[in-house]
Image (cartoon, coloured by chain):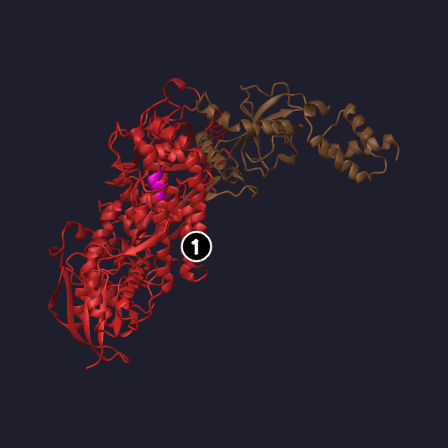
Chain colours: A brown, B red
Amino acid sequence: MSTDELRTAITTHLQSKSLYPSPTWLTTFLSTARPSTPLPALQQTALFRLLTSDLTTTLSPPPAALFPANIHDATIASRRLDSHVVPVQVLDVEDLSRSRWAQVEALEAAERGETTKGREVVRVVPGEEGLSGEENAGAGKGQHKVLLQDAKGTQVYGFELGAVEGIGVGMNIGAKLVLREVLVARGLVLLEPGTVTVLGGKIEGLQREWKEGRKRALMQAVGIEDAS
Amino acid sequence: MGARILCVAEKPSIAKAVANHLGGSVPARNVPGLAWLKNYEFEYSFDPPWGRCNVVMTSVAGHLIKTEFDSRYRSWNSCNPAELFDAGLTKFVEGDNKAIAKNIETQARYCSKLFIWTDCDREGEYIGAEIRDVARKIKPGIEVMRAKFSNIERAHIIQAARRPIPLDEKQANAVAARIELDLRTGSSFTRLQTQSLKPIIDHVQDVGIISYGSCQFPTLGFVVDRYFRVKNFKPETFWSIKVMHKKDGVNVNFHWQRVHLFDRMVVVVLYERCLQTKTAKVTKMQRKPTSKWKPLPLTTVELQKMGSRFLRMDSQRVMKVAEELYQKGWISYPRTETDQFDRGMDLKAIIQRQTQDGTWGPFAQGLLSGSFNQPRSGRNNDQAHPPIHPVNYVTRDRLNDDEKRVYEFVVRRFLACCSEDAKGESTTVEVDYGGEDFHATGLIVLQRNYLDVYPYDKWESSQQLPPFTVGETFLPTEAKVTEGKTTPPGYLTEPELIALMDANGIGTDATMAEHIAKIKERAYVMTRPRGSGGATMDGVTDGDDEALGRGTRGGRGGRGRGRGGRGGATLGVRGRTTGVEELIPTTLGVALMEGYNTIGFETSLSKPFLRKEMELKLKAICAGTATKNDVVQESLEQYRAVFARTNQQMGMLKAAVRRYVLGENG
């Protein structure tokens, strides 16, 4: 397969996931790919790389794959982004169903290696799955607010109107979603299972930073300045 | 005439009751040396092979033998407290027990059999073993059996006399292990703490000793944890959408499926979507039979919890009163984990005795006339005692105030268990309004059943819902965004503390009340009635809803009018029961827990983990899967490690004491 054919095959595959890689990114990717690698494996690798990349530097999408310029217009009560299929990455996620303080308490219990099972205080053995019980507690209840960013760097808040599998405080920061003709009300993207596809992935640095800073951010949100 | 047999009960009152059941009116004979100690002599025909015997019935008064360190370790400054982990132990009889032991020795000399009538639980088994050891010192070959009984009702006692069983050595060993562990860990840490910390605070507070106990500390830990949760609490605002629709003259309040969200912008956007849709559509209308389950048979833990909740007594007081009622034969043994009645038990006979009561007699009669239902079965069975239940009927004028309340509770609980669940019909209406789900529920109580005799449970009909049909649409009379604030949890109450201890394996049902009393006595916690001063924290409202759409905001959301009803929005669940005491740690209590937490969370003495492990090991001894020696050694190793670390990092404990008790550096 010629380089051009390879280029096309990979582009087609990524576009089937609504991702439009920039030519530079593709060139770099192909230069590191070993020619002997079978195409499907190469396509998988390309997708994986993109999902763990920062979309603002790796995509060059057509306008229909970006938020419209007036996305933040709060005077528009409600509209559907017709014919827009927008890949985004998640920069922040909040559970709106629980008070921030309750989340701080759960994080602190987890720091002490404890969680509660009903009234029983349970010691969490390091290395066991699901370290903090709160990641399960908040998951899948569909009450999350996420900060979304498109390939041009535009940031918009989204709210999980209907529970979307994969969205929750246990998700990775930098995870990619594809928004297909989503509803936007007063500048808030309304996420529903029918319009949102969770592709997964993450951005390593952001994820670490978010996790480490989460408790401090929650504490600051409830007015504790010295959240050391 | 057959053999001479020595019967020994755990308390004088039991000895007297059993003697009278077996021997008729038996005169009490004084025992030299102790005014209250009596022997009862009579003849009794046991089942073969014992046959007709001369019986001497007497008692001990709880534990007979004291376990202590060898005398050279006994005084406070005799050794480094660390040595107490290995110091030699001696057992001896002291004080009043000398006369009691002497009496057993004297009697055993003339008896060929020893029949033990201590309470049927671990502690009773151990006391039985103590009695046996005293008797065997004088009469090595004496045959030893024990009676298995759980109340001192006549027929039950006679049954027990007919079926002696062997003493359970394993249970006695578990207690022996517990005694040794409590002594070693308690003394070593108490001496260490007192020697290191008392001098720091002596000038501001006379604390006597700063004691440690492996149950006391985790118990205190729960109180301190909650204290900090209350103290550190940050109120937060949340928003909700309330929908009300007036139909057939009824104001139906619909609750938002999302309950509330901690983000105003999101709630306002969702609210606007509701308003844009204009009409709500009924998606579900369901009527279904529902019931409120009658309570489970009564256990000790449950009795203690209910005591502080409804009888205005703390757990220790409830247990003391229950113990007296048991000794007088009015109720069954009050220390039990069992929440299932044996199928073979004649419950109707017990109900029959209650029919003569002026208040609940008719209800009891009703049960006998056909409404009797087999009690529910819980999941616990300690294989020793049935659930707590009334034994004989007693008129209220023969009881004091506290006894009346506990007896009444036990009887009502029992009758409730034998009754039927309360029956009702619940109605649920669900509507879709602007893509958001709302629901309203109604309840009609159709048959009160057990509730008639059990006023401690509440279940009442709510307002009736008018009929709705699926697919029906309506324009809600009112829809508005409401605002509320989270409220801090209350300080820990005794029933909550007991529930925590129970869930975390701290103490046994029989000892929990003592541990709580102990931390009060040590001035580690104080109590005060819930709701008395200081409970309201700054800036905290009680989930009082404030209509957002009112007044100045105008414009959008204009459909909201006036204030909504209260309720539903309170986050922190607060038990609204009256007379409950809340527990607040003293500065010393806080200092100790914080100090240990700083030294190391992993094995902090404020946490329940170590003690829970020990309790499991004691159970293993009872089950025969571990030996006393292994358990003692293993547990001591764990505590010894904590002791070494504590000793090494005493500075942290001292700093905590200075900080919290003396108020130094913040």
- Magenta-drawn segment: B188-192
Residue visible at 36% across and 42% down?
B81
Q: Is residue B573 above or below residue B144?
A: above
Please state the chain letter of the residue tagged with numbered disc 1 in the rendered image.
B
Residue B628: in magenta span: no
- Where on the picture, by quarter, is residue B500? top left
B139 sits to left or right of A74: left
Q: Is residue B132 above or below residue B495?
A: below
Residue A188 in percent (x, y) is at 55, 25
- At mark 1, the secondary structure is helix
Q: Is residue A19 above or below residue B349?
A: above
Up-down: is B365 above or below B571? below
Residue B504 in view here: no
Q: Position of residue B543 (x, y in %)?
A: 35, 31
Quadrant where the N terminus of chain B is found in the figure: bottom left
Q: Can residue B436 be seen in the rendering of this structure?
A: yes
Location of residue B475 in the rendering, given as x and y in whole percent from the top left corner? 43, 33
The mark total stands at 1
Relative to B556, B578 lies left or right: left
Quarter of the image with the C terminus of chain B is: top left
Query: Which amino acid does the dot numbered 1 rest on?
Result: Val
Crowding at dot 1, Cα within 10 Å, few <14 / some 14-19 / many 20+, comes out as many
Front one among B377 and B134: B134
Could you say where residue B610 lies in the image, as x and y percent from the top left? 43, 46
Q: Predominant secondary structure in magenta?
A: helix
Q: Nearer the viewer, residue B55 or B67?
A: B67
Q: Quadrant of residue B442?
A: top left
Q: Is residue A114 left or right of residue B108?
A: right
Which residue bears the numbered disc 1?
Answer: B631
